[in-house]
């Protein structure tokens, strides 16, 4: 029969995790905490390894992905439970407080970090309970990923050969536990380098081509033509966002250089490419339209990369069927959905491990209004423990 999590231990664990800073690239403290908890629970250090994913990141970073492998005490296919350990910078300095069934940061200038410390706590608690209570379980891999928030870098560069060939995979990184994410969008990350022509802004402004003006014209035309925000064209859907603009350092200089960071998303790979190409064309057209009196104009250099490809898992996939059984074991009806954000499941699925994502109670992520719903969190812990111990079928048939 399924084993229930220790609610008091689980809540204490997530409160501790929420206090530990771990922005993308700075996850060493949180990884050390997880390792220490496993060793204190009796797991040999040889079962804990980190890969070199951070060395293949644009951030470099303090540590790679943490991989924990537990030999099975019963027969069955290896199961993978995972969560990402990094948070957005807004969570640094979080002071979690609990009021009723909600946990938020007492410092109203910070987010609490439920994304994704709730998922980390659910997976970690399942592993610790198995060790502490000697629970029977199939072969397990528990994976704690870094640098998810900056483009799924940890999962992209994951040393997949170290996972032990799992055939069932469950990612904890969402809100209500009964919403199973079986599909997610793909995204391009774009760096637009706009090269204008410098001149003295007071003496000879006509000799310059302002890179800020080029950027402004391109962005305005994209907005007017419906290629920013939610995009719907020819029954295809996607999204694009101007996220960062940097340039200029003096008001008396016609600005020669501006960088613009952009993302383009769509579940449809061809339409996503169309969004990217359209953005590039608008910036190139704007660059040609801003000229000096001698007819010179600026130019655009574009750097783009595919952050992650979209995916959709069949509802007949074994991981989905088992996740549904786990949700039913909680007395809930599972609902499968696809989302417009990226998940580590994108890369695991692309690497041949179809991965379904479950929730652990996080809401309003990446904002100061972020909260962790403790009732939903404990349901996530129950689902994680049922999946880790392969008892979801017993519970769903009880």
Image (cartoon, rainbow, N blue to C red):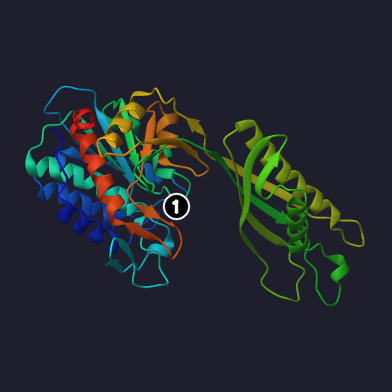
Indicate the position of residue 102 as horizontal and vertical percent values. Answer: 32, 62
State the residue in front, 16 or 150. 16
Image quadrant in which the C terminus is located: top left
Image quadrant in which the N terminus is located: top left
Q: Residue at x 44, y 44 (%)?
A: 152
Q: Is residue 253 above or below residue 173?
A: below
Q: Residue at x 15, y 47 (%)?
A: 38
State the residue in front, 232 or 296. 232
Element class at badge 1: loop
The residue pinned by badge 1 equals 59
Quadrant hosting residue 16: bottom left
Using residue 318 as the reference point, say whether residue 241 is left or right of it: right
Indicate the position of residue 30 as horizontal and vertical percent values. Answer: 27, 55
Q: Is residue 312 above or below residue 242?
A: above
Using residue 215 as the reference point, say whether residue 208 is left or right of it: right
- Res 86 visible: no
Using residue 150 as the reference point, say whether residue 35 is left or right of it: left
Indicate the position of residue 71 as horizontal and vertical percent values. Answer: 15, 30
The local crowd at label 1, few if under 14, some if 14 to 19, many if 20 or more residues have their Cα within 10 Å, is: some
Quadrant hosting residue 244: bottom right
Toward the right, the furthest residue is 294
């Amino acid at each position: 029969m399924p084993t229930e999590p220790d609610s008091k231990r689980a809540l204490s664990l997530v409160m501790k995790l929420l206090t530990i800073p771990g922005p993308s690239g700075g996850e060493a403290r949180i990884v050390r905490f997880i390792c220490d908890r496993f060793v204190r629970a009796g797991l040999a250090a040889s079962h804990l390894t980190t890969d070199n994913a951070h060395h293949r990141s644009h951030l470099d970073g303090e540590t790679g992905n943490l991989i924990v492998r537990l030999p099975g005490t019963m027969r069955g296919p290896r199961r993978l439970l995972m969560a990402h350990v990094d948070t957005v910078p807004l969570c640094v300095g979080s002071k979690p407080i609990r009021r009723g069934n909600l946990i938020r940061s007492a410092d109203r200038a910070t987010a609490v970090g439920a994304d994704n410390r709730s998922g980390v706590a659910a997976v970690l608690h399942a592993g610790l309970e198995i060790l502490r209570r000697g629970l029977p379980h199939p072969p397990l891999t528990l994976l704690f990923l870094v640098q998810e928030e900056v483009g799924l870098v940890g999962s992209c560069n994951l040393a997949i050969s170290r996972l032990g060939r799992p055939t069932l995979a469950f990612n904890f990184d969402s809100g209500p536990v009964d919403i199973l994410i079986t599909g997610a969008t793909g995204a391009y990350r774009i760096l637009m380098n706009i090269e204008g022509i410098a001149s003295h802004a007071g003496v000879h402004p006509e000799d310059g081509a302002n890179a800020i003006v080029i950027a402004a014209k391109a962005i305005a035309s994209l907005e007017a033509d419906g290629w920013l925000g939610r995009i719907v064209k020819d029954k295809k859907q996607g999204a694009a966002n101007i996220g960062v603009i940097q340039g200029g350092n003096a008001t008396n200089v016609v600005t020669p250089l501006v960088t613009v960071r952009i993302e383009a998303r769509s579940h449809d790979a061809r339409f996503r490419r169309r969004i990217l190409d359209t953005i590039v064309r608008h910036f190139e057209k704007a660059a040609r339209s801003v000229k000096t009196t001698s007819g010179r104009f600026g130019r655009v250099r574009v750097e783009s990369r595919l952050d992650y490809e979209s995916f959709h898992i069949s509802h007949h996939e074994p991981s989905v069927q088992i996740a549904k059984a786990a949700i039913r074991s909680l007395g809930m009806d599972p609902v499968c959905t696809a989302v417009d954000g990226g998940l580590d499941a994108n890369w695991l699925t692309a690497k041949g491990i179809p991965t379904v994502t479950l929730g652990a109670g996080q809401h309003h992520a990446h904002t100061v209004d972020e909260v962790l719903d403790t009732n939903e969190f404990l349901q996530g812990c129950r689902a994680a423990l049922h999946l880790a111990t392969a008892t979801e079928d017993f519970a769903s048939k009880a």
